[in-house]
Image: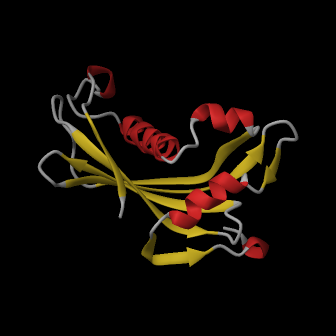
């Protein structure tokens, strides 16, 4: 099952053209990732406790339909790629307008960093267990670390 969160948009998400500013889409995607891990017992305080954080190598957003002031959305999270120990990951987010029309698609490619050493790291076992429990997309790809991109 794809993880999804409904959101009530706020005035600060919009620009003078009365449509959602482009960076707000990525903010909602980041919020869904945070809520996904918290929902599975790995809150932001757990990230701090384990001294690990996410970094992004790529973030690609495709826009299909504008979101206007007053429209609510649902943002989804889907695992589309990962390395064997989930050191690296790829997620796809879909931003959907309240009546079911897809507004945008955001694909990210990232990894986990040890916040003290400032080096890439394997995530804690609890996080690996969360990843192992995720449904993989139909086009899921294994990320090979030798050619990681």
Q: Position of residue 42 (x, y in %)?
A: 58, 43
Most extreme residue toward the right is 117
| Relative horizontal placement of residue 149, taking residue 97 as reference (left or right) | right
Q: Nearer the viewer, residue 21 or 131?
A: 131
| Relative horizontal placement of residue 26, taking residue 50 as reference (left or right) | left
- The picture quadrant where one finds residue 142 is bottom right
Q: Position of residue 99 (x, y in %)?
A: 11, 49
| Relative horizontal placement of residue 147, taking residue 99 as reference (left or right) | right
Q: Nearer the viewer, residue 34 or 43?
A: 43
**Residue placed at 16% from the left, 35% from the top?**
71
| Relative horizontal placement of residue 135, taking residue 84 as reference (left or right) | left
**Residue placed at 71% from the left, 56% from the top?**
125
Q: Split into 4 quadrants, where in the image is the N terminus? A: bottom left
Q: Is residue 128 above or below residue 50?
A: below
**Residue placed at 27% from the left, 24% from the top?**
10
- The picture quadrant where one finds residue 18 is top left
Q: Position of residue 90 (x, y in %)?
A: 55, 62
Most extreme residue toward the left is 99
Q: Nearer the viewer, residue 19 or 48?
A: 48
Q: Split into 4 quadrants, where in the image is the C terminus? A: bottom right
Q: Nearer the viewer, residue 16 or 56?
A: 56
Label count reads 0
**Residue placed at 79% from the left, 37% from the top?**
115
């Amino acid at each position: 099952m794809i993880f999804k969160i409904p959101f009530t948009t706020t005035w600060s998400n919009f620009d003078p053209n009365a449509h959602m500013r482009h960076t707000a889409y990525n903010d909602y995607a980041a919020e869904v990732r945070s809520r996904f891990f918290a929902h599975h017992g790995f809150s932001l305080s757990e990230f701090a406790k384990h001294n690990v954080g996410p970094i992004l190598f790529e973030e690609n957003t495709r826009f299909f339909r504008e979101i206007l002031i007053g429209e609510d959305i649902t943002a989804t999270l889907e695992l589309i790629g990962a390395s064997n120990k989930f050191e690296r990951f790829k997620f796809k987010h879909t931003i959907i307008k309240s009546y079911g029309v897809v507004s945008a698609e955001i694909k990210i490619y990232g990894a986990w960093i040890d916040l003290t050493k400032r080096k890439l790291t394997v995530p804690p076992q609890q996080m690996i267990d969360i990843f192992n429990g995720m449904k993989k997309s139909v086009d899921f790809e294994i990320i090979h670390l030798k050619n990681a991109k």
